[in-house]
Amino acid sequence: MARKKYARPTPKQFIETWQTSASTTEVAEKLRMNTRQVRVRACRYRRRGVPLKLFAWPDPPDWDELADYAASLVPGEDKTTSESAGI
């Protein structure tokens, strides 16, 4: 299976795109790179003294709400059984 080819933007293209974007996903889409490549490259630039901005972390999910949702999708499961088992 052939590997997907990704773009290799110049350092100036990368920095401009990073500084004008709102997330690593947006940078990756604009530069046709995967998000892991984008994060690694940003980390390397920072280690070399390039002051790239930091992106805000997304809000953490509501785990209790997700647990209730997952339980509601299982047909015939008794919620009290999983709650008493500490799951």
Image (tube, helix red, strand yellow):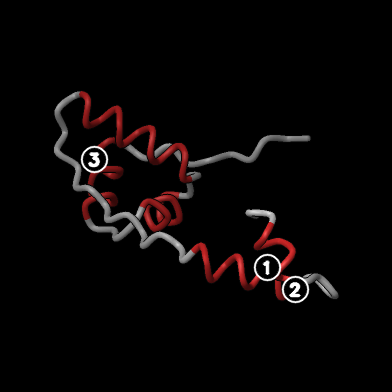
Query: CB atoms at circles 1 and 2 under 8 Å apart?
Result: yes
Residue at 50% from the left image edge and 44% from the top image edge: 34
| In this picture, residue 7 sits left or right of residue 15 | right
From the image, tell me which residue sits under label 3: 12
Q: Secondary structure at mark 2?
A: loop
x and y, in percent, of residue 82 in the image? 71, 61
Query: CB atoms at circles 1 and 3 under 8 Å apart?
Result: no
| In this picture, residue 47 sits left or right of residue 27 | left
- Amino acid tagged 1: Ala
From the image, tell me which residue sits under label 2: 73
Q: Residues within 10 Å of mark 2 (few under 14, many from 20)?
A: few
User: Of tags 1 and 3, which is closer to the observer?
Assistant: 1
In space, the residues marked 3 and 2 are separated at their CA atoms by 48 Å
From the image, tell me which residue sits under label 1: 70
In space, the residues marked 1 and 3 are separated at their CA atoms by 45 Å
- Amino acid tagged 3: Lys
In space, the residues marked 1 and 2 are separated at their CA atoms by 5 Å
Seen in the picture, residue 12 relative to 47 is either above or below; the reply is below
Query: Residue 5 versus residue 43: which sits nearer the camera?
Result: 43
